[in-house]
Structures are given as structure tokens and as C-alpha cells.
Image (tube, grey):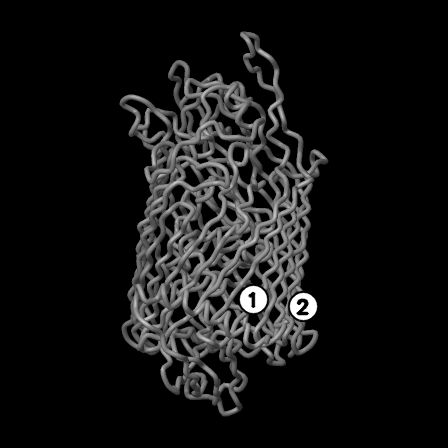
Amino acid sequence: MKNYSLFISKKSIMRIYILILALLAGSGCAYSQHIISGNVAAPQNKPLDGAHIHIEQWQGVSSPDGHYEVHGIPSGQHRVVISYIGYKALDTVVDVYSDMVLDAVLQPESTQLKEVVLSENNSVSKNTVHEQRLRTETLEKYSNASLGDALKEIAGVYSLKTGSTIVKPVINGLHSSRVPIISNNVRLEDQQWGTEHAPNLDINSAGRVSVIKGASALQYGGDAIGGLVVVEPVSVLKDTLFGRTIMTADSNGRGGSLSSALHQGNDKGWAWNEGGTFKYMGDRETPDYVLSNTGNREANFAGDVKYIGNTYDASVSYSFYNATIGIAKATHIGNVADLVRAINNGQPDVVEPFTYNIGAPRQEVQHHLAKANFNKQLDDDSSLSLQYAFQLNNRKEYDLRRGNFADIPALDLTLATHSVNADWKQEKENTTLKAGMSGSAQFNDASPDTGIRPLIPTYDKYDAGAYGIVSHSFSETLSGEAGLRYDFSHMSATKYYQKTRWDNLGYNGVFDRFITADYGTQWLTNPEFTYHNISASLGIRKKLSTAIDLLANAGLAMRNPNPSELFSDGLHHSNGTIELGNLAIKKEKALKLSATLLKTGGAFRFEATPYLNAITDFIYLSPTGVEYTIRGTFPVYNYRQDNVLMAGLDLHTDWDISSHFSHSFNFAYVHADNTTKNEPLIDMPPLNISNTIRYKTDWHRLFMELRSEAIFKQTRYPQNNFYADVPVNGVLVPTLVDISTPPDGYQLLHFTSGMQFSLGKTMASINVSVNNIFNTAYRDYLNRQRLYTDDIGRNFQLQLKLNY
């Protein structure tokens, strides 16, 4: 009876997917299983014994003569990774329709960030920093969402939101300037200082996305106090042409996205990649009401051309990100009575019928990134990489304005960044040496045509840095790494201050040296700041057994205050808050200690990472009251600086219960204190636990996944409530405005299912998912709009993927 029931279940599911697929392509075919074999060698055809071959969930190891075989590979397109410690991994995509031979000649590892190789080799890796990577399946699942949404599936990574579409990654409680994003080996410069400024990149252009927690990747900078997000494009080293198209439709927002890409790989000669994404979404909805003016649009492109020679390669690449993002109207308040009512009543003041129109307030963002790169293998042991990159970011934020100003942005910033990098690497026997230099020139232009004093002024910034890193294997079970970096930075700004604001901020007599002209009610100033920073890292890796490694790291990082923290002066329209910077703010200094116990291989795998982060002069936004303007009444936030101590634990497990069932578990907790004020630190993520149970079968690669996401109430927070005078029957009554108390905890259930069908040489995949199955009403503590609205409710998603 049990087998009969399972058969009926499969037939029912099959009918659903066949109906959907028939509208798009036609009937499916059954799988065949094949063998991929070949030889793995170093240059001069030296066989590599113990190289690891990963073909998604299928694995193999090369023999002493370099030969390998991996059996049971179904027909279709598969990602193949062949890796060996000390050599650059081959990472490619192949179309499998019969047994095939795939040989690999691995080159000594280049200057790119090293990846974690899950290895059963008895030799310990020299990489002492654990890198967590999103699976390709996860990236594709979030094709219609954002990078911040996808990264939440990694333990210890949260999301900082402004509404439902602006999402920033939070690593171990830290975000924005403390978590640099490296896109295509270029540090993303896109006005990332803003808490409501999402990364300006398309997740569909990513081939791999990795998270590094800590400040140890010194080649990218010395200010990664929280960690790094590394986004790498698709790289194909096999002579093949293939493409991918993903179509996604969402019920919540009543829209969807279309993403398509083509890739021409090659191990020698010319190779190229190109792809684009289009997104079109309307207003999102909570379980009880429409979130008015929350639609979004995107039109993105990314492409590159590369020539691969015998001892060198050269490439040029370009990407363009173009987005229009609606900001919920309910976050912009007309007077103090409306503000108090909106915050204290828990219901938005503005609820309008669903629409695809995006009015004010809204963001319009365009980001261009162009890069030229040259890599040269100097000899068998060393290599050199040279890179130039240019970024141009234009951000416009539109407020609710009237008359001739209705279509003029309230904030119009153009940020141009030139950067150069030179990296050298040498690997001899048990020692690896890395060294490099970098420099950048950045120019921010705040348009005066807005008619409003800009929140961020016009400024110029120049940076230069140099680093050195040494890694050494002391034995087959112990390795270590040490690094040192120096950074220089100089910033010069041009800014007007109202004299009343200048005096209220305590600048009179303190920063008079910055004043260059007197314009009656305003000072024209030229603030200049110069910083010299030293960053360092030290790590060890100890192999405790064949499958268990212990990694320990200590990192010293220094972060300069960003333009927002120094110069903010006025209404931040996307947040509906008035933000005030502080010229007296000093740079942050952080010492982070962490350890990772890592088990790989076998049916049960886990990684546990406790950490301690002591930050001196930590910069944060603190609510201080309300301000009455001709535009309306808004909460006021001031940038403050105190010493903090953060401790936490990230835990992730994977358990293959059987050949069909698996379970994964994420646990993340941060305990953070403002030690200067002896109180909890503001805006820290609460305890987060997720469980995922997954069923899979070889029958059309059917999978079904149920995920539980439990977010506990944050019980540790500072008390920053204040009183505002609210008119009641013609009398001003002091009324408590509760902006501090976190919302209740909540639990969400999500379901995803998918199947694959072979259509000749095209592989079609159909996924159906339901997020927030029970349409739970909730508010997230790290959503900047939680004071005004609920988060979005249930969402049905249908996704079709074609690999060809």
C-alpha cells in the first residue's frame, strides 16, 4: 500500500508539471545515466593524485596516474568543479547526453581569492579562512529577488531591509560600509553608506557568491569589520557554447522577471559571456493591506570578452544596473500627530488600491562598472595580475513634492570611482607569498538643481594601500597564515551649513578652520580628513582527523567614517528620517577573534563558528526626537560613537538521512553591548533558527523542500523612546512615541518543489514555491519601515529554467 500511495502521488505531481510544461515546450523524456571520465594533470602533463571532482552532488577522486571516473550522471547540463590544493580549480558547465571524456590541466593558483575545497585528502589546506558559498540552485531560486535575500540562507547572515525590495546583507550584526561587496574582483562603490541603499548588482550575473566572515581577506582592503561578500561571474574553461534562461512569476507584486545569458568557454583562445535581466513588479501586499507605492523595475546587463594564451590571459568586462524602486507612502508623514498615530497604532495611514505605478517617494539608480584585467604566469611558481576598473553610480531619490518640483529629485548624487590593483603571488613547496598594491580616486557630485541642501555633499576621496600575506604548511595537519596591510585615505568636501545647525551640533569654535565663506544664514565649509590605517590577520588550520578541521583567526581592521556619518544634514527621503552626521567622528578599530570547527564528508556535516568582536569608536545611528519641517514631521537620528563588544555563534549542519531525505539546520545568535553606555547595542539581529527538510529522487530529479524560519523577539535593546507634543482638542499634549520596542517574534514556513525534463538538447526545469505559506502578519526588527507597516504576506512563485 505504501508503494502504491507513492506511485499515485508521483502521477498527480507529474500531471501538474506536464500541464505547465506543455504550454511552453512539449512533453518530457526520461533520464539516462552516463559516465564522465578523464585525466587531471599539472602543466607538463604531471599527473595529480587526489584531485577532487565535484559534479553537483556526484563526486570522484583522481588516482595516482591522474585518472578519474564519476558514474551515474543523468542527461542534461551540469556544473563540474575539478580542484587540487595549490592549483586554480577548473569550474565549468558541460552538456551530458552520453558518456564523455573531460581532461583537465590545472594551473598554479592565481591571485584570486582561494576557495574552500571540501577534501578527504590527508593534507591540510593552507587556507585558514572558511568561505561559505551559495549553491547555484539557491542563486537561481532568488532570480527575481536580491543578493541580500539569497544570502539569508547562510547561517549568521541576516538582512537589513527598507520595505520589501531594498535588502542589504548583515554579517554577524554588521552591514553597509563594514561589509564590502566584491563584484567581479572589483570593490563595489555605489553609495553603500546608506542603510536603505541595496547593492547595485544583478544576482543573475553571478556565477558564484561567497561569504567570508571576518577581516582576513586583506587583498580587498583592511576595513571589512563584519566580513566580505565575493560575487564572481560565470567562468567556463571548456570549449563549449551554452545558455540559460530563467522566467519567474510572483503572485505578491503580480509581476516577474526574465533573465537570459549565453556563455562561450575556452581553455585557449577567445571566450565570452553576456546576459541580461528584466524585472517588473507592482505593489506588494501584507496579509491585511496593500503596501502602496512599493513596486520596482530593473533592466540589467553584464558581459565580458577574454583571450587566453599559453602563459597569460586578458579580459574586458562591463555591467549595467538600472533600477526604479518605490518607497511605501506610509513612511512619509505630514505632521506630528500623524507620526505618533502611525507609530503607536501599528497601522499605515496610506493604503491605496494595487497599482503598477511607481510614484514618489522612490529611488532611481544606475550603476556602470567597466573593468580591464591582465594576468601573467611569470614562471612555474609565480604570477602577476593587473587591473583597472571604472564605476559610475547615479542615485536619485524623489520626495513628495508639489508644483514645479514634483518631478525634480530631492537628492541627486553622481559618484565616479577609478581604481587600480596590482597583485603578485608565488608558491614554492609549502609556502605561498602574496603581495599587492591598490589605489583609487573617487569624486562625488551633489547636484544643486534639486533646490534642497543635499544630504551628502560634493567631495573628493583618494585611497592607496599595500598588503603582504604569507601562508605556510608546517606539516600535513597544520598550516598558518599571516598578513599585514597599510591604507592611506584623504577626503575633501564642500558643504553649506545653516548657522543654527552648526551651533546646535556644537561646531562653533571647534571646526572654524573648515569655514571658507559667510553667506548670511549659512557657512560654506571645506572639511578635510586624512587617515592612516594598519590592518592585520593571523590564522591557523589544524586537521584533527580525515574529516574534521579546526580553523582559528584573529583580525585587526580599521574603518574610516563614511560621508554619511560625517556630513549627513537633513531628510533622508527613502527612510523618512532626518539624519545628522558628526564631524568629530573618528575611525573605527576592531579586533575580531573567531574559530571554526568544520566537518566535511560523510552523511552528517557541520560547521560551528563562535566569534568575539571588540570595536572601539563604533559608529551608529541613534533616534533623538522629532523635527518639524515645511515638508512634514520626521524622526531625527544622530550619528553617535561608543565602544562595543559583540559575541556570537553561527551553526550550520547538513544531514543525509537517506538516499532520498536530507535535513539542514541554521542557528545564529549575536549578543552585543554598548560598553560605553552599559546597555544593549541598537539594531542587532535577534536569534534566528531555520530548519529545512528536503526530499529528492532521480525520477526527473524531483525535489520537495519545506523550510521553517523562526525569528525570535529581540529582548536586548536600548530605550530611545521620546515624547512629542501632539495637539488634542487645541491643546498640546506630551505623547510617548515608542520607536524602541522590537516587534514580536514570528515563524514562517516556505515550500519549494521542482522537476527537470529533457527536451532534446535542452534541459527544462520547473519550480513551484510558496513563501509564507500561512500568510503570517509580522514585522522584522531589522526592517527600517517596521514602525509603519507589516512585511509582505504569502507569495506563490512559478519558475521555468531552460538550459541549452
Depicted 599 relative to depicted 584: above or below: below
Q: Which amino acid is tagged 2?
A: Leu
Question: What's the CA distance linking mark 2 and mark 1?
Answer: 29 Å
Residue 181: mark: none
* Residue 141 position within the rendered picture, expressed as x and y whole percent measured from the top left: 45, 59
Helix, strand or loop under label 2: strand
* Among the 4 quarters of the image, the one containing residue 318: bottom left
Residue 451 vs 61, above or below: the answer is: above
Q: Which corner quadrant of the image does residue 329 belong to?
A: top left
Q: Which residue is mark 1?
A: 694
On residue 550, the disc is: 2
Where is the N terminus found, in terms of image quarters?
bottom right
Residue at image coords 47%, 84%: 72
Labels 2 and 1: the sequence-earlier one: 2
Q: Give x and y (percent) for residue 225.
A: 57, 50
Tell which residue pokes out farthest to the bottom in this image: 65
Q: Position of residue 354 (x, y in %)?
A: 38, 38
* Along the viewing direction, whichever of 517 and 783 lies nearer the viewer: 783
Residue in front for this viewpoint, 484 or 227: 227
Q: For the residue labelled by badge 1, is the local secondary structure a helix, a strand or a loop? A: strand
The mark total stands at 2
Q: Pointer 2: residues within 10 angstroms few (<14), some, or many (20+)? A: some
The answer to whether residue 688 is left or right of residue 626 is right
**Residue 345 image-quadrant placement:** top right
